[in-house]
Amino acid sequence: MPTTITPTSTEPKPRRHLEDHDHGSGRRPPTDKRTGGGGDNDNWNDRPNGRRGPRERLVRYRMGIFFALASDLMFFVAIVSTFFVSQSTGHFDAYNNFVNEWSPTLIPPILWLNTAVLILSSITMETARRRMFHEVDVMDEWLGLGKPITRAAIPWVAATVVLGIVFLVGQWIAWTQLAVQHVFFLSNPSSHFFYLITGVHGIHLILGIFSLIAALAGLYVSRSLETRQIMVDCAAWYWHSMGIFWLFLFTLLVFFQ
């Protein structure tokens, strides 16, 4: 009786199980274009929430930054609203004359230089952020071929820190120049708002410098490329927001007193 031989199937076995458990940390780097990569076959959107790869984590952190900045925006809006109300507020003296104590504060010229420094720092920070998401170099890092994007971003983040410190020093010099002219916090309503606006913004900028330093340290010590990208990205968005806030406040102090 002839023996029957069943041919062995030559079709490749499905790799669904392998792909479903590959999150970019194993043999295959993630191909999410927003965090480095160049393909669309990663099926991040088919996975449950919390397991959709680098893009989901990046978006989550960005939303946290934007919500925090929204509260800052409301605070600055309140200050600006009070600024305009105070300009038209006064009192009647003993002779029934309306007295408005608002006296415009002369803006120290160094604030123009400070504004240029802050704009330049925003450019350097955006350059660092874009370096962290350069697709070709990102793939090299995922494949273990060195740290090209990290090395490229470090000088730009460091330059932003230096420029931020220069801006704060310039603000201190501006305050010193006003003090020499005997213009202090309580001298008149205008000077009150000048010190309040520049002081509050300066505090926020100090927090921004700390975030830049943390991002810079993360570029050196973090082993996760995704973490390094998120730290630089969030620090950049915060820094850009402080720059936009300052342009608005500086315009207010120069042209609307």
Image (cartoon, rainbow, N blue to C red):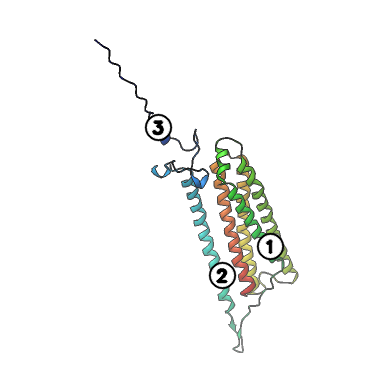
Q: Distance between the residues labelled 3 and 1?
A: 58 Å
Visible residue check, residue 174: yes
Question: Disc 2 vs disc 3: which is toward the camera?
Answer: 3
Mark toward the start of the polypeptide (2 vs 3): 3
Q: How far apart are marks 2 and 3 (CA)?
A: 60 Å
Which element is circle 3 on? loop
Mark identifier at residue 114 = 1
Residue occupied by mark 2? 80
- Give the residue type that dot 2 points to: Val
Question: Disc 3 vs disc 1: which is toward the camera?
Answer: 3
Mark toward the start of the polypeptide (2 vs 1): 2
Which element is circle 1 on? helix
Cβ atoms under marks 2 and 1 closer than 8 Å: no
What is the x, y in percent for residue 70? Answer: 51, 60
Q: Residues within 10 Å of mark 3 (few under 14, many from 20)?
A: few
Q: In which quarter of the image is the C terminus?
A: bottom right
What is the x, y in percent for residue 54? Answer: 49, 44
Q: Residue at horizontal 59%, vertical 56%?
A: 239
Mark identifier at residue 15 = 3
